Amino acid sequence: MTKCLWLALALVAAACTKPAAPEYEATSAPAPVLPRHVVWTDGHHPVAVSSSGAAQCLTTSPAEAARALAQTNAVRAQAGLGALRTNARLQAAAEAHACDMARRGTMTHVGSTTSGPAARVKAQGYRPSITAENIAAGAAGVFDLDGTLAQWSASPGHRANIVLPMMREYGVGEALSADGKTAFWAAVYSDPR
């Protein structure tokens, strides 16, 4: 399993009452051609992409959340899967992680105070049976919501998270780096216990 998926698919401890989810392998396909100033994120280690400092932490508007959900559900529908629904706690976890990455200037699944996405959603009061996360960073103004979602859909590892059959809920967040030049994104997919 790719390192990205291993980090993204942080399963709940063995005490979980639901059976363990099957493992999913990302298909190996060539990376798509990316727009200028986009940082590729498939299977990466932490990547420093901007200077650290006081980030601009953004709140996802209801219109943005609805647009992101519609595009994500379109990808799931193409795979014959049911639609996700937004969840306020997952939204908060995604926004907080995007902000944390922007403050550090580093694109990573590991948070400043958390080991991965499952820990972050639990900190928001969400009880997951499974959690996956997509992250990205790129030039602000170029790497917008639609462009980010398109890149995740085109990336085998990120698309694998989007089309995990057991996922039911979703949240997305964005933040800008201290210099305002880099947009950081996080999306969280989960299934509640």
Image (cartoon, helix red, strand yellow):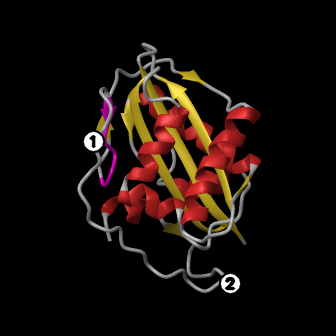
- Look at mark 1 in the image and give the residue it sits on: 33
> Where in the figure is residue 86, as x and y percent of width and height?
73, 51
Report the amino acid beneath label 2.
Thr
Pointer 1 local density, CA inside 10 Å: few below 14, some 14–19, many at least 20: few
**How many numbered marks have been drawn onto this rendered protein structure?**
2
> Going from the N terminus, do you reach mark 1 or mark 2 first?
2
Q: Which residue is more in the foreground, 165 or 95?
A: 165
- Residue linked to disc 2: 17
Q: In the image, which residues are magenta?
A: 38-43
Q: Tell me which corner region of the image, top left, top right, bottom left or bottom right, holds residue 91.
A: top right
Residue 89 lies, with reference to residue 8, above or below; the image says above
Residue at (62, 81) in percent of width and height: 15
Residue found at x 67% / y 33%: 60
Q: Magenta-highlighted stretch: main secondary structure?
A: loop
- Find numbered disc 2 in the image and state the secondary structure of the residue it sits on: loop
Q: Alpha-carbon distance for marks 1 and 2?
A: 42 Å
